[in-house]
Amino acid sequence: MQVWITGGGSGIGRALAEQLTLDGHSVCISGRSKEKLSAVSPDISAIPCDVSKPESVQNALIQMPPPDLAILNAGTYSPGPTHTASPEEFQQAMAVNYFGVINCLTALLPRMLERGGHIAVVGSLAGYRGLPNASGYGPSKAAVISLCESMRAELDGTGVKFQLINPGFVKSPLTEKNDFEMPYLMEAEEAADIILRGLQSNRFEIAFPAPFVRRLKFIRLLPYRFFFPLIQKVTRT
Ligand SMILES: NC(=O)c1ccc[n+]([C@@H]2O[C@H](COP(=O)([O-])OP(=O)(O)OC[C@H]3O[C@@H](n4cnc5c(N)ncnc54)[C@H](OP(=O)(O)O)[C@@H]3O)[C@@H](O)[C@H]2O)c1
């Protein structure tokens, strides 16, 4: 199987690329930094690409065999209170995390609708509800979740399998920015194992780790009068 992974030069994307290669698949990774990409195994082909730029995505796809599986994993995260962030930081979160996915989907879908295939988009449990110090990242992931719900319904019966991956906390350069204790933090390799098992299932959402997902799904249902006091309590440092 030919696989394309965006953001494959580090963290979850890299762990997925390495495991899929060990499993005998032909993997191509993309990201902006050539250095990061070239530090990954030489068995994995690397095509630099900035997902926030439609022409860069189109260019990358021209240079690789058509993917049977595309894992749209590239993402950016800049934590902190809203009043300390610049408008550009919010724009960057949407440009990479949301429009980056759109740029890849619009480039991939015409061909995939003809020949069939599989697309999995990486969202986040942080997209379930608005959380303090994540006002750039959270909305971009909430948008991804909503986008994927629309796409799943649209692609039903077309021959394109479509899944949403919502991880909890995973050790990576992205979570190194967090200065708080991260519940249920796991290694990228463990996350990759769970994701790869999920990709073989017919579940729409691959969310993990299970105990954290259960808690957040419950919190997602809470009315504001319960939600805000609880979130204040659990996120207070
Ligand atoms: N780690 C977690 O706890 C966690 C939890 C929930 C969801 N996620 C999501 O999981 C995905 C992978 O994150 P990670 O934790 O593995 O972090 P990571 O190691 O920082 O990986 C993110 C990757 O995205 C690439 N990237 C960033 N901007 C890009 C752009 N404009 N175009 C192309 N590639 C770009 C980065 O490479 P370059 O800088 O070289 O471009 C990097 O390799 C992200 O979507 C993240 O939001 C992570």
Image (cartoon, rainbow, N blue to C red):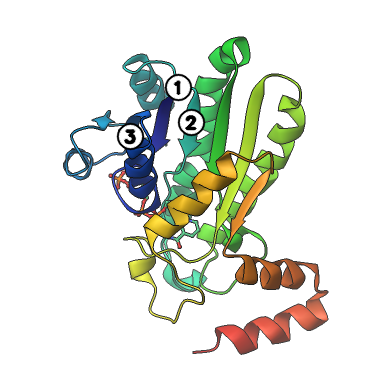
Left or right of residue 135: residue 213: right
Q: Which mark is residue 67?
A: 1
In the picture of the structure, the residue carrying the numbered disc 2 is 70
Q: How many marks?
A: 3
Closer to the camera, 180 or 132?
Answer: 180
Q: CA distance from mark 1 to mark 3?
A: 11 Å
Closer to the camera, 226 or 212?
Answer: 212
Specify the amino acid type for callout 3: Ile
Ligand 1 closer than 8 Å to the CB at disc 2?
no
Q: Picture coordinates of residue 236 (x, y %)?
A: 55, 88
Q: Within 10 Å of the Cα at label 3, are there few (<14), some (14-19), or many (20+) other Cα atoms?
A: many
Left or right of residue 15: residue 113: right
User: Would you say residue 130 is visible in this rendering?
Assistant: no
Q: CA distance from mark 1 to mark 2?
A: 6 Å
Specify the amino acid type for callout 2: Ala
In the picture of the structure, the residue carrying the numbered disc 3 is 29
Residue under the image location 63 percent in, 53 percent down: 142
**Helix, strand or loop at disc 3?**
strand
